[in-house]
Image (cartoon, rainbow, N blue to C red):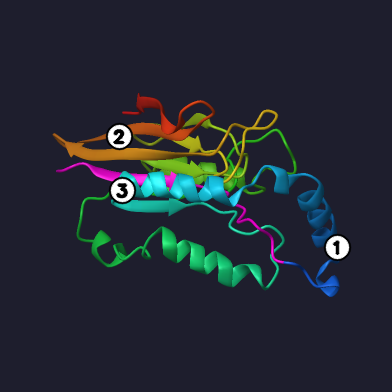
Amino acid sequence: MAAFTLAHLSDPHLPPLPAPRLSELVGKRALGYLNWTRNRRKYHRREVLDALVADLASQSPDHIAVTGDLVNLALESEFPLALKWLESVGPPERVLKTLAAEQTFRVLLVHHPLRSDSRIKRLTDSAELIALIRLHGVELVLHGHDHVHSTVWLEGPNGAIPVIGVPSASALAHGRHPAAAYNLYSIEHDNAVWRCEQIVRGIDAKSGLREIGRVRLF
């Protein structure tokens, strides 16, 4: 089986934020808007996101996975922009009709990490999801939300399962958060077993976008 390349990016938090109406800034949106104007808009940059997506396209992946957050405040005006951006990244997934008849490499896409010490960032039903994964198995779990590189391993029915997070696709490096990056997964079926290599590409302050890591997962 020829290698299949899956690209994964997350959390573009599409900038710039459309101007909200005063009536929209109630509850959590008001706090989110203050956070955006005072802090997050400094780090989530459209030119960074566009450069990352252009580099991703140059790698010619077979499929692209995006695990949120596309928007910032869930304003009505943000959603058409998010759709337009998604359509610019790649065409929609059309492989589901053939999955039943093919040998498949199962990738579970979630936004939140499966394990987190933060009550705000945690997936509230993660215990139930982890139990299902342990029972039925998948080959790979991909997520975003934390805006950092991360890899943890879960026990599955046929061995350990990698759970991998990726930084924000639009971010400049700040604090504990690295600069924008995405992952490529080279997947192939070899002698009845799956092989998967992870390639990390991201922004380097000195040399722009480049490969910053590579590891054989299995």
Q: What residue type is labelled 2?
A: Cys
Front-lying residue, 151 or 200: 200
Residue span colored magenta: 1-18
Front-lying residue, 183 or 154: 183
Q: In this view, does 37 lie to the left or right of 96?
A: right
Q: Is the magenta stretch mostly helix, strand or loop?
A: loop
Q: In which quarter of the image is residue 148?
A: top right
Note whether 82 is above or below 149 in the view shown.
below
Name the spot of residue 115 as percent of width and height, x first.
Answer: 61, 36
Measured Cα–Cα span from mark 1 to mark 3: 40 Å
The secondary structure type at the circle numbered 1 is loop
Question: In the image, is residue 5 part of the stretch drawn in magenta?
Answer: yes
Q: Earlier in the sequence, mark 3 or mark 2?
A: 3
In the picture, the quarter occupied by the N terminus is top left
Q: Does any portion of residue 52 appear in the rendered image?
A: yes
The secondary structure type at the circle numbered 3 is loop
Name the spot of residue 29 as percent of width and height, x first.
Answer: 80, 61
Measured Cα–Cα span from mark 3 to mark 2: 14 Å
Residue holding disc 1: 27
Which label was assigned to residue 196? 2
